[in-house]
Amino acid sequence: MIQAQDFQSALGLECLVSSPNASWDIRSPELNRPGMQFCGFYEFFAFERPQVIGKVEMAYLDKRSPEERRKLLDQFFSYKIPCVIICRNMTPPPELIEAAQRHHVHLFLSKQVTTKFTVSAIHYLNRCLAPHVTRHGVLMDVYGVGVLLTGKSGVGKSEAALELIKRGHQLIADDVVDICRISEERLIGTCPEQVRYLMEIRGIGVIDVRAMYGIGAVSGSKSIDLMIELEIWDDSKSYDRIGGEEDKIEILGVSIPRQTIPIKPGRNLAIIVEVAARNLSLRRSGLNPIQELNLAFQE
């Protein structure tokens, strides 16, 4: 469900006509420009989408007589429309406002040109309607790579993140990470508003990272490119020493690389996370040290 007030606030809209319907059951991040409907063609009318009136649609309405406008707008608003947005800060005809009031449909005004508003609205709807999941962990931006640190409670995720912040990297979320799939191959992680920029350090308590380290130490969102799972070192377990085994994990149907890092006293987790992030960037650019090592042995 899309909240009308959130839609208005996020896109900077002015409300001309309000409606008792505070939320809309929008299922597709698409918009509709009702030019064909104003001309009387309703066979493929996508009425379930937000309706956008641009310069062309408004020019057509302006050329109609008040009686013609009233008739075509009554037919247009007879469908269950979530909302209507007028772009370019154009002044709507009185019949448009009256029809929206009679049918209890939100009518908004945008200062943006139609194309820019359409792009912004589709981006917003994509984010709202994208599949979401919440994961326990810490999300960091390390050298431009979104690194999700996971592991059991108390394993040291926040402490590793704090050291990374001191080294100039950015915190996105601590403890609770909201993940949404914005495309078939991309995940975006954010932090719930209530705990944004906050971090819990055992023995100290909750700290405000933005207040303590500055605005450059935090960020609102980041793509999730790599998951690093921290676990206590187990002497009976065999760990990959060469990096030839590529492990992946699926979140919301998107496959991302996963690495397991064992923890024991003396290991500098921050440096290890930095190396893992840089190594992923190198592999994406086509440089794979394992392949080069295999070629060297073959020669």
Image (spheres, rainbow, N blue to C red):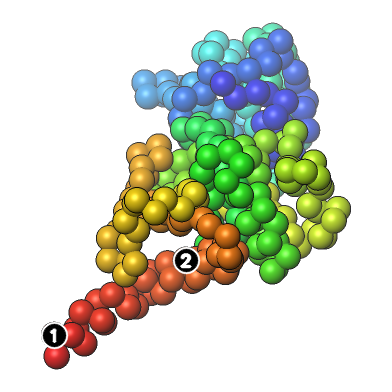
Judge whether residue 214 can be spotted in this image.
yes
Say few, some or many: other residues with alpha carbon within 10 Å of mark 2 (under 14 / 14 to 19 / 20 or more).
Answer: some
- Which residue is at 77% across, 27% downward? 15
Query: As drawn, which residue projects farthest toward the left?
Result: 298
Query: Residue 110 lies in what quarter of the image?
Result: top right
- Which residue is at 37% across, 71% downward? 283
Left or right: residue 208 compared with residue 7: right
Query: Residue 244 lies in what quarter of the image?
Result: bottom left
Disc 1 marks which amino acid? Gln
Which quarter of the rendering shows the N terminus? top right
The percent position of residue 225, horizontal first and vertical second, equals 46, 56
Judge whether residue 86 can be spotted in this image.
no
Q: Name the residue under label 2.
A: 276
Left or right: residue 242 compared with residue 28: left
Q: Is mark 1 on a helix, strand or loop?
A: helix
C-alpha gap between disc 2 and disc 1: 27 Å
Of the image marks 2 and 1, the number of the one nearer the N terminus: 2
Q: Name the residue under label 1.
A: 298
For residue 181, the mark is: none
Query: Residue 8 lies in what quarter of the image?
Result: top right
Q: How many labels sit on residues?
A: 2
- Which residue is at 77% across, 25% downward? 16
Which quarter of the rendering shows the C terminus? bottom left
Depth order, front residue of 9/293: 293
